[in-house]
Amino acid sequence: MADYYTPTVVDPVIPVSAILPIEAMFLSQVFDEDVENGIAYYFSEDGASDLIFFDPKEVREALDATDHASSRLVAKLRDEHTDAIQGDEEFELDMAGDLWPDVLQDIVRRAPDLQDLTVTMAFTCSKMRPDGFGGLAMLITSSTIRSESTHTLFDRFYKDARANGEFSHGDS
């Protein structure tokens, strides 16, 4: 059986002051984190987590701690998990992989000294399988999230090569 990994790095480091408490709770479960001297570094050796668990009491405290009008995470929690937030039992937030780029973008939007964030992912596998290798690059600015994988890059290469007549068989 092959094991697939997605080592991930978010760069540059982020001022903790730009991260809302609820976002800090979320990001610390999506990624590994090192917080030191007022900055947070997010990374993962295996890949970002898609399944996040929240303690409702901690969520309520985090939501009460600051203004969070600019957070799509807060909007999602309030829209989809209102009852769970008011309850006493831990609840899960599935598909965090679809949400963490938005959370990072919200941070970029609020942080005056942060122009952008980049996310670099390597796709690796414990066995030499063609589908187990590659990568993804993401650029997050206040207005746009751009990403491209090596697979889409190869698709573009092939399209360009065909358009340029670079593929021919039997020519010598």
Image: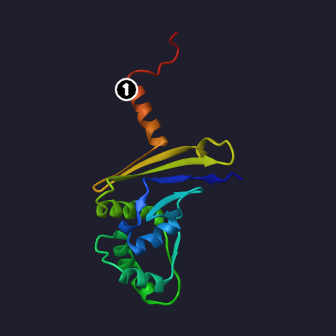
Residue placed at 37% from the left, 62% from the top? 102
Within-10-Å neighbours for mark 1: few <14, some 14–19, many 20+: few
Where is residue 20, by image quadrant? bottom left
Q: Residue at x 52, y 9 (%)?
A: 172
Q: Secondary structure at mark 1?
A: helix
Name the amino acid, label 1: Ala
As drawn, the residue found furthest toward the right would be 1
Question: Residue 44 placed where, x, y %?
Answer: 55, 57
How is the rendered protein coloured? rainbow
The residue closer to the viewer here, 61 or 81, is 61
Left or right for 151, reference 66: right
Q: Residue 9: x percent and y percent?
A: 50, 53
Residue 31 showing in the rendered view: no
Residue 155 image position (x, y, % from top left): 44, 37
Vertical position of residue 170 compared to residue 29: above or below:
above
Q: Is residue 2 left or right of residue 111?
A: right
Regarding residue 17, the answer to whether it shows in the image is yes
In the image, residue 157 sits, relative to residue 40, either above or below, namely: above
Q: Is residue 27 above or below residue 2?
A: below
Pick whichever, 132 or 145, lies toward us. 145
Measured along the vertical axis of the image, is residue 166 above or below residue 137? above
Residue receiving disc 1 = 163
Q: Residue at x 35, y 78 (%)?
A: 79
